[in-house]
């Protein structure tokens, strides 16, 4: 069975859902849906997601939005062979983050990266010793930051972690890197301009 995912590869939250699906062997049909477009304001879409946001999952009439909830649902519903990516008894805290540009917010991003440096230094991954959906969410954001030139030089373990994810995350190049490239091509000039203004 194929599930519909309303979203776009340019969106880090959509990519984290796609990476999760790839890892557990679920096929998602991407229904290209751009944020703030007329498509998400339509009555048909609002019935699926009253918040008019992406990603939105349609599993045979069951509609879910919010990437982390979708990731958990996919693992609980379709990952019967293993709980490797979403352990049933988690032993580690999970962190997620994301910020916009400004000197103060860039400082907060670096503070989040300091925490991430500690997490991945001790265990190699965000939520333990193995790859989980937490890593799919974090690597989607980190790779977008990298695409816009965020400096990871102060965070060697984060840089190492990102390279490990590029190697080990199922579908990284075909899903995540492709989405980063799309996002950077659409918004790279604006982000560069915003960085110069800050």
Image (cartoon, helix red, strand yellow):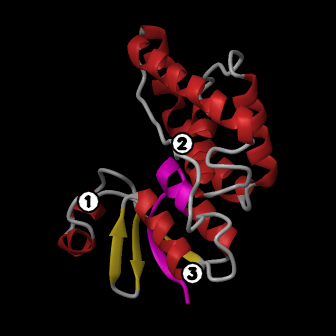
Q: Residues within 10 Å of mark 3 (few under 14, many from 20)?
A: some
Residue wearing tag 2: 183
Q: Could you say which disc has been placed on residue 78 in the image?
A: 3
Q: Is residue 159 magenta?
A: no
Q: Find numbered disc 1 in the image and state the secondary structure of the residue it sits on.
A: loop
Q: Which label sits in the foreground, 2 or 3? A: 3
Q: Find numbered disc 3 in the image and state the secondary structure of the residue it sits on.
A: helix
First of labels 1, 2 by sequence position: 1
Residue wearing tag 1: 52
Q: Which label sits in the foreground, 1 or 2? A: 1
Q: Is residue 81 visible?
A: yes
As displayed, is residue 80 above or below residue 18?
Answer: below
- The boundaries of the magenta stretch are 1-17
Q: Residue at x 40, y 88 (%)?
A: 60
Q: Residues within 10 Å of mark 2 (few under 14, many from 20)?
A: some
Q: Residue at x 35, y 70 (%)?
A: 64
Q: Position of residue 85 (x, y in %)?
A: 64, 63
């Amino acid at each position: 069975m194929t599930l519909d995912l309303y979203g776009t590869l340019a969106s880090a939250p959509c990519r984290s859902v796609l990476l999760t699906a790839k890892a557990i062997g679920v096929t998602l049909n991407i229904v290209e849906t751009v944020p703030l477009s007329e498509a998400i304001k339509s009555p048909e879409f609002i019935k699926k997601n009253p918040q008019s946001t992406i990603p939105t999952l349609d599993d045979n009439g069951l509609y879910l939005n919010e990437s982390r909830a979708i990731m958990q649902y996919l693992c609980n519903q379709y990952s019967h062979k293993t709980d490797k990516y979403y352990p049933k008894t988690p032993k580690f805290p999970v962190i997620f983050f994301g910020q916009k540009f400004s000197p103060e917010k860039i400082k907060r991003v670096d503070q989040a990266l300091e925490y991430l440096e500690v997490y991945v230094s001790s265990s190699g991954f965000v939520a333990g010793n193995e790859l989980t959906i937490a890593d799919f969410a974090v690597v989607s954001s980190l790779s977008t930051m990298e695409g816009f030139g965020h400096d990871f030089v102060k965070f060697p373990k984060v840089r190492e972690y990102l390279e490990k994810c590029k190697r080990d995350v199922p579908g990284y190049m075909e899903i995540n890197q492709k989405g980063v490239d799309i996002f950077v091509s659409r918004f790279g000039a604006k982000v560069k301009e915003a960085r110069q203004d800050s």
